Image (cartoon, grey):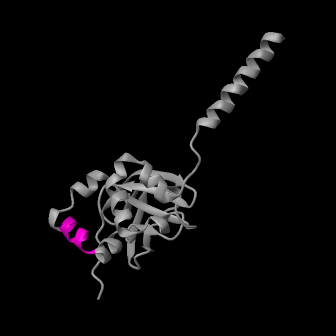
Amino acid sequence: MFRRRVLLVAAAAAIVSGCATMSSPVSVADTIAANPSLSTLNGLIVKAGLTPTLKGAGPFTVFAPTNDAFKAVPAKTMDDLAKNPAMLKDVLTYHVISAKVMSADVKNGPVKTVNGANVAVAKAGDFVTVEDSMVQTANIVATNGVVHTVDRVMIPPKKN
């Protein structure tokens, strides 16, 4: 009996200490900043001045291009984005929806982005696409929304 009680106390202590080391949920901006594969995106979010917005109330869904996705963007396009803050902000907000959309909740069809343009989202089984991008890691939950990593940078349509 005593040994069983000691084992139960030890198990409870392990559970409690395990919970204490778990990181507390953070904003979409902090979630992106903490992910090494999203460091390019994080730097661009900071440069565009979007960090305070993405730390705000939300909810937000961010289709977050990985570092590899940014490597595939032509150098001229990246240079243009670096020189034009308005264009950079347009591109980044084209990856954000003003709602929390988990991958299981994706409905096929157009969705309005924070940029104002629509993106085509689709789901087939467990696969989710946004325009020509494939979601690689889905449902990275944040306090004010969710982040889904994608394999391509989406360029919004030109505004008239």
Residue 42 versus residue 111 in the image, above or below? above
Q: Residue at x 44, y 49 (%)?
A: 34
| Residue 58 appears left or right of 51 | right
Residue 154 versus residue 127 in the image, above or below? below
| Residue 34 appears left or right of 155 | right
Q: Quadrant of the C terminus?
A: bottom left
Name the spot of residue 133 as percent of width and height, x first: 32, 60
Q: Residue furthest right?
A: 1
Frontmost residue, 55 versus 72: 55
Q: Magenta residues?
A: 77-84
Q: Is residue 81 magenta?
A: yes
Q: Residue at x 16, y 62 (%)?
A: 75
Name the spot of residue 100 as percent of width and height, x first: 54, 63
Q: Is residue 27 magenta?
A: no
Q: Residue at x 83, y 11 (%)?
A: 2
Q: Residue at x 29, y 75 (%)?
A: 87
Residue 26 versus residue 11 in the image, above or below? below
Name the spot of residue 152 as percent of width and height, x first: 29, 59
Q: Quadrant of residue 82?
A: bottom left
Name the spot of residue 22 as percent of width and height, x first: 58, 39
Residue 126 seen by the camera: no
